[in-house]
Every structure is written in C-alpha cells, then in structure tokens.
Image (cartoon, rainbow, N blue to C red):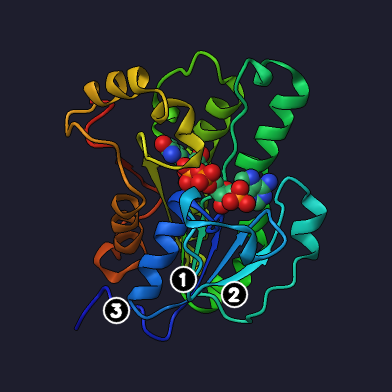
Amino acid sequence: MNELDFGGKQVLVVGGSSGIGNGIAQAFRTRGARVHVCGTRASAKDYSPEEGSHLDGLDYARLDVSDPQAIENFKPSFDRLDVLVLAQGAVIYRRGEFEMDGFRKVLEVNLMSLMACAGKFHGMLSTANGSLIIVSSTAAYHSTKGNPAYNASKTGAMGLTRTLGQAWAEDGIRVNGIAPGLVDTKMTRVTTSNPKRLEGAIGRIPLKRLGTPDDMAGAALFLASPLSSYIVGQTLIVDGGLIL
Ligand SMILES: NC(=O)c1ccc[n+]([C@@H]2O[C@H](COP(=O)([O-])OP(=O)(O)OC[C@H]3O[C@@H](n4cnc5c(N)ncnc54)[C@H](OP(=O)(O)O)[C@@H]3O)[C@@H](O)[C@H]2O)c1
C-alpha cells in the first residue's frame, strides 16, 4: 500500500494560487488527487510562474476571503472533499498593522476566514473522514516587532488548530497544522530581494537555505495521509531549524 497515493481524492487549497499553497496543491495533484485552488484574482490566466504560481492541472476559482459574505456565497464545483488546506495569508508592512484598519484586515484574512472556511466544509470533510490542514507560521512562537496583526493571527491559527483538532476528532476529521519558517514566495520578497537581508536571514537558519513550497508540501502530504493517522491538533514546525 502506498500511503501517499491520493488517487481518487478531492483536495481544496484556499490560497493555492501561489507560493506555499500552490506547492502543496501541485504535490497532491502529482500524487493523483483532483485539486481545486482559490486565490484573489479573476482567473488562472492572471497568475504567472514568476510569482510562484503554477496552475497547470489545477481547478481555479476566485474567492476573496477578506469578505465573509463571499465565503458564505462560494459555490464549490465539487460535492465531496477529502482534504482542505487553508494556506491563505496576508501581511501589511510599514507599520500598517498598527492602524486598526490594517489590523482588522489581516485578522480577517489570516484568522477569521480559517473558521469560516473550515465551518463551510465541515460536513463534506466529516462525510469523507477527511483532513483539515491549517498553515500558520513560526511567528506564532515569538514576537514580530513590525507586524502585530500577522503575529496575533498566526498565534490564533495555532490555537484554532488545537481546538478544532479536539472538537472535530469525533466527527471523523483530523485537524493539524504547519508552521513554516522563512519560505521563498511573493510574500517574503521584501526580505529575499534585498541581498543584505537575505544573507542575514539565511545565516540564522541552521540548514543554511530558505524553505521552498515543496518543503512545506512534504508535511502537508504526511498530515493528510494515513501515516499520521494518530496525530491530531498538532502544528508541525517546518523551518530548517530557524526557531531552535
Ligand atoms: N513565506 C513564508 O516565509 C511564510 C512563513 C510562514 C507562514 N507563511 C504562511 O503561508 C501561507 C502562504 O503564504 P505564501 O508565503 O505562500 O505567500 P503567497 O505566495 O503570497 O500566497 C498567499 C496565498 O494567500 C492568498 N490570499 C491572500 N489574501 C487573500 C484573500 N483576501 N482571499 C483569498 N486568498 C488570499 C493568495 O492569493 P493571491 O495569489 O491571489 O494573492 C495566495 O494564494 C500564508 O498563510 C502565510 O502567512 C508563509
């Protein structure tokens, strides 16, 4: 038996249009799953590989999770779901998260929408004895001076993972999470496009390289597979040793 064969499974990755979510989506697809992804833009054509978006073979639909009504109204093109990955995330730089507008916006995308999406697909996941995987961040383990909203949202995401893990185990849904360290995506360009910052960042990572969406996908495949059948409510740190 190949526990990492997802043939016949349906997967939805919210935030699967680029970066980590996209890497996770493609990893499930290459292992046989039918994979649906959501992002903010009108169509798949609006994304490019240079931004970390590889949408070949994925079913794309627009869903802006900063709007709770849009989540409620979202009509999925499937009626069965085995794996839900919530990888959506936003950050505001230049002290924007110290203003309440910015703080609310980030909390809406990074935390409120997790509960809204999880709740929306609870029925389908329960019917399929499925898995929910929440992408938080190593930011949940330490302060991030310029980003109070990002930090609070990711700490909240980890708590939500724990609590839904406990609450939904009896519904047949295994809920777990991934806390990435520093991964090369469009979100981290602010660090990776600046040679000095990049060098400093890599210097602090014991494995001496940035993480890749593929590195994160390994953890997601494991958490959605029977290999992790007795793991519930945990958030796996996948950071090359960054926060050791
Ligand atoms: N990169 C890192 O170092 C790192 C570290 C720790 C945690 N994370 C977390 O990993 C997750 C993925 O981030 P990433 O690094 O892969 O960045 P990314 O490439 O910018 O991906 C973010 C994803 O979230 C989607 N998204 C953002 N705002 C949204 C909204 N309002 N509605 C729906 N979707 C929305 C994006 O859609 P569009 O493509 O349409 O913008 C994209 O699919 C996030 O939760 C992030 O916080 C990243």
**Of circles 3 and 1, which is in front?**
3
Exactly how many numbered labels are in the figure? 3
Residue 69 in percent (x, y) is at: 82, 54
For numbered disc 1, what is the local secondary structure?
loop
Ligand 1 rendered quadrant: top right
Residue 200 percent location from the top left of the image: 29, 18
* Residue that label 3 marks: 5
Which quadrant is the N terminus positioned in? Answer: bottom left
Tell me if residue 65 can be seen: yes
Residue type at tag 3 = Asp
Q: Which residue is mark 2?
A: 124
Report the residue marked by disc 1: 130
Look at the numbered discs 2 and 3 and tell me whether their residues touch, using CB distance below 8 Å.
Answer: no
- Please name whichever residue, 58 or 199, is drawn nearer the observer in this view of the structure: 199
What residue sits 39% from the left and 26% below the top? Answer: 141
The CA distance from mark 2 to mark 3 is: 20 Å
Tell me, yes or no, whether the two marked residues, 2 and 1, touch with CB atoms within 8 Å: yes
Q: What separation in Å lies between label 3 and label 1 (alpha carbons)? A: 15 Å
Question: Could you tell me the amino acid type at mark 2?
Answer: Met
- For marks 3 and 1, the one nearer the N-term is 3
Relative to 139, residue 129 above or below: below
Q: Residue at x 45, y 17 (%)?
A: 143
- Give neighbour class at mark 3: few <14, some 14-19, many 20+ (Cα, 10 Å): some
Q: Is residue 9 left or right of residue 225?
A: right
Q: Nearer the viewer, residue 153 or 161?
A: 153
